[in-house]
Amino acid sequence: MIAELIAPRERFDVLCTVEIENTFESLHAHVDLDGKIAIEVGDEVLVHGDEVTVPYGEKLVLRRLATVTRANWLDKAWTRLLARLEFTELYEVSFSSGRKL
């Protein structure tokens, strides 16, 4: 891609801890990268490995390899622009009587 020639991206692999919980109290998946790596605007994190299914009522903690792709200046600008445009969607207002016709 032309953007990659203009502003190349840095990629590196890092180990991470993946915590997945599917309980009444919480339904979440968190990824903690080793080495306290800060993820910034436009950065991408791809966690490698097989698909994971956690049955209801259980919690699972895994160690996996992840690839971090740092955003270049073009990616950061594009992400910020899109974020501002998508934020305006929150302003959508609907007026209805609440009655079914």
Image (cartoon, rainbow, N blue to C red):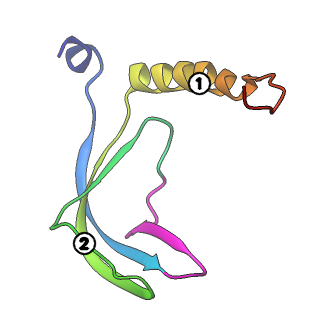
Residue at the location (27% across, 74% down)?
Answer: 53
Pick the residue in front: 57 or 86.
57
How packed mark 1 is, by other alpha carbons closer than 10 Å (few <14, some 14-19, many 20 or more), is few
Residue at the location (75% across, 24% down)?
Answer: 91
| Left or right of residue 74, residue 90 in this image | right
Task: Please tell me in which quadrant of the rendered image residue 14 appears.
Answer: bottom left
Q: Is-magenta flag for residue 67?
A: no
The residue to which callout 2 is attached is 52
Q: What's drawn in magenta, residue-wise?
A: 23-38
The residue to which callout 1 is attached is 86
The residue under label 2 is which amino acid type? Val
From the top left corner, tell me how far across and down residue 6 is, in percent.
27, 13
Going from N to C along the chain, the mark reached first, 1 or 2, is 2
Q: Is residue 28 above or below residue 75?
A: below
| Left or right of residue 100, residue 66 in this image | left
The residue under label 1 is which amino acid type? Glu
